[in-house]
Image (cartoon, rainbow, N blue to C red):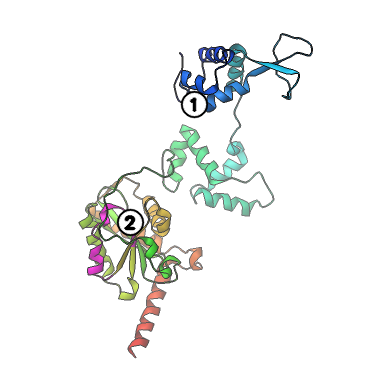
Amino acid sequence: MGGGGEACSHLSEEERQVIRIEIGNGTIICGIVLMLGRNASTVGREIKRDTWFSSNENESCRPYRPKRLKTGPWTGRYYIPGPAQRKTGRRRAKPRKRYHLSCERLWARVAERLRRGPPPIIGGRLRVLFPDDSAMRVCPQTVYRWIHADRHRRERRSRCLPRGHGRRRRRGGGRTSRFPIPGLVPISERPPEAGDRSGFGHWEADGVIGAGCNPHTEVERKTRFLMAGIVPGKTAGESVGAQPAMFSPLPAGARVSVTHDNGTEFARHTRLRDGPGMDTYFADPYSSRRRGSNENRNGMIRRYPPKRGEIRMGMAGELREIVDEADNRPMRVLDYRTPAEAFADELLELQDQQGVLHL
């Protein structure tokens, strides 16, 4: 049968003929579903939408559908494939509901501000600029959908998005099997001052995937201070081997713990316990939100060398410029101080506390 069993195709006229025959034979929906190889909701919706009822009041043999179904005079139901097929064609010919961004005035504002900030910031800024204009409202998902709905807009505008993706991604990502990391301590055992960001010296670690070499990033949770370095590969020895070199210049109070994701590149995390003396924790699988600061900073780095872009060991100077820009950008969560200023203040406070203890 034409289109039978295809997941994304519409019911064909032959399938509707089968539905008519089986309804007349008294077959239940489950039996029709098995016969057609269709989803139960598809068949059930088709029968409900295109079933007609005849009336015994005027003994009319012409089937029709009343405005309100009720028991009593409404007897016998009819499913006719021809009208059902024609109704389907008319429904498909009707224009779909247009996107909210079809409004030229709204889209002009969104397009103007795409290079200045991500879609969530654009929506919030429009509320500030047009507090009394309900037409100038847009949610981030509408902006993403509008950009990716048209090939020319996608080619021109997707590079302005925070991740620069040319196509929309499925939420949740893939699920890959991982071998158990020895000595893994879950994030639930991390001290409260690390979880609520009240304590200084607790870090988040991750790697930025690239072609060739990979930047390794560390972000201090309280001050959002970023450190980064380029490692030759993504093996456990290379990734964890870069961490002692990054943490060794810091005083002990500024390197208390570090939280990793469940990547295999952190399998040798015990080196941090033996070397710099840092506690190591691991976030729950597929819960990158538990390491939000690090994911945010990795996104900023990817704006320059895109994901899977070529990264070489000789690009350390370029990476340093990116890190400096991120650390010297004021943040509202830091009362509009920069991460570099907040980190320097914490180091000074740490030195004062150590001086008092020595006295």
List the residue tagged with mark 2.
206
Numbered circles on residues, count: 2
Residue 275, x across and y down, in percent: 22, 69
Q: Nearer the viewer, residue 236 or 208?
A: 236
Examine the rendered structure and indicate whether residue 291 appears above or below residue 76: below
Question: Bounds of the magenta span?
Answer: 259-277
- 253 on left or right of 158: left
Query: Does the magenta-highlighted stretch encompass residue 163?
Result: no
Give the residue drawn at x 43%, y 40%. 170
Reading the image, the residue beneath label 1 is 39
Q: Secondary structure at mark 2?
A: strand
Classify 24 as above or below 207. above
Real-space Cα distance between discs 2 and 1?
Answer: 43 Å
Of tags 2 and 1, the one toward the viewer is 1
Q: Earlier in the sequence, mark 2 or mark 1?
A: 1
Q: Is residue 275 magenta?
A: yes
Residue 352 image point, x, y percent: 38, 83
Which part of the image, by quadrant, shows the C terminus? bottom left
Instruction: Check disc 2 and give the amino acid type.
Output: Asp
